Image (tube, grey):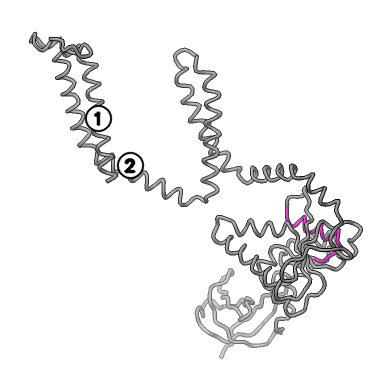
Amino acid sequence: MLVKVIRFFVTALLAVIGGVIVHLASPVLTELISTEVLKTSMGLYKLTMANVILIALGMAVGAAVGYLISPFVASTLQRFSVWVEGQLSKMPLQDVIAGVAGLAIGLIIANLLGGAFSNIPVVGDYIPVVFSIVFGYLGIHIVVRKQKEIGELLGRMLKLKKKPKVQADAAEPSYGAGSAEAPLAGGMTVAARPSPANYASYVGCKLLDTSVIIDGRIADICRTGFVDGKLLIPVFVLEELQHIADSADALKRVRGRRGLDILQRIRTESGLQVEIVNQDFDDITEVDSKLVRLGQQLGGKIITNDYNLNKVSELQGVPVLNINDLSNAVKPVVIPGESMHVTIVKEGKEHGQGVAYLDDGTMIVVENGRYHLNEAIQVEVTSALQTSAGRMIFAKPVTA
């Protein structure tokens, strides 16, 4: 149906164009006609019979040409629409919205500027068109590229508008030790911004960062009772989890929702006192830096599996509980000379090396293992490397 509509409009458009062209050329063409009858005026828009015949012929020729080329035009438009749809489907939704907003802003600016230059002789009529193209493109390009910074700026402006309300809330008695807390279902409470007067009640508390929540092992550790005391979840960590869960990227969205599910498990299964702390730092943008600052203020410990956050926190005097260190500590110890049965699954970085894995995910680099790819072989441990990022075992095949 769409193809038929496009072909009809193309045919009609070419017919009109053919009639207009012949009408413009009719003064010259009528001079070639010697028959007086054809030069008789018909009383309609000062057209003679010759003009009407020529216009009809022009429209017929234009319609014929339009009918012949309309299949090509229709197929070209269909391919173009499919290409545009494919390009839009690859773009995240926020990029599409940002592009539309940028285009609207660019066209508004072009319209305002174009009106000022429209009175210039000769080129005045074309300047608004040029401005619309240039500023429309610039609006799309700039807003799509800078959408994150624009969003952060708008967020800060909204926070500044809400500042008086936040200060009024902060003037109320703080929730914490010796004062009421806003309880939530399942034992979780929401604490207002801690004041220096009750910092002592938070000494030794545990602060969760985003990466350790998404990792998920912290829920099992809390459930087994290895973590005690008060468990704090800063509000900015919750906000980051929510942003990840709402991301247009499918992988990030799954990770964010997993983090929220882990928090639910901690709340219902750990038996710990879990609080959400409404403490934020407007002068800091990075979540990790905010977490370190909060740990310094409250005298708490940060639970993480982020190697870089671990090092930064230690440099700033904030104790860190790295669950990777805990995981490595409880793994079975291997000593040089011990043999084990492994399957070589891929090649290593160095020449001749093969890589295998234990059931707990520990990587084993096997010397000359490349020649036993996808084979289960007996290997002998030569050394082991232990770091906060994990453990790596080096081995060599056992010769028969």
Placement of 125 over or under 173, stated as above or below: above
Q: Position of residue 199 (x, y in %)?
A: 89, 61
| Kind of residue at disc 1 | Leu
Placement of 383 over or under 81, stated as above or below: below
- Report how many numbered discs are placed on residues in the image: 2
How would you rate the neighbour count of disc 2 (Cα within 10 Å): few for under 14, some for 14-19, many for 20 or more? some
Placement of 102 over or under 130, stated as above or below: below
Which comes sooner in the sequence, label 2 or label 1? 1
Was residue 121 drawn as part of the magenta stretch in this picture?
A: no
The label on residue 77 is: 2
Q: Circle 2 sits in a helix, a strand or a loop, which is it? A: helix
Q: Indicate the quadrant containing the C terminus: top left, top right, bottom left or bottom right.
A: bottom right
Q: Position of residue 40 (x, y in %)?
A: 12, 9
Residue at image location 53% in from the left, 27% down from the top? 110
How would you rate the neighbour count of disc 1 (Cα within 10 Å): few for under 14, some for 14-19, many for 20 or more? many
Dot 1 corresponds to which residue?
A: 14
Q: Position of residue 265 (x, y in %)?
A: 67, 72
Q: Tell which of 325 and 288 is nearer to you.
A: 288
Residue at image location 14% in from the left, 19% down from the top? 53
Disc 2 versus disc 1: distance between alpha carbons? 17 Å
Q: Tell which of 143 and 222 is nearer to you.
A: 222
The label on residue 118 is: none
Tell me if 315 is positioned left or right of 16 in this view: right
| Kind of residue at disc 2 | Leu
Q: For the stretch drawn in magenta, what is the main secondary structure?
A: helix
What span is in magenta? 286-301
Q: Position of residue 156 (x, y in %)?
A: 71, 44
Displayed quadrant of residue 161:
top right
Residue at image location 71% in from the left, 59% down from the top? 237
Tell me if 198 is positioned left or right of 335 in this view: right
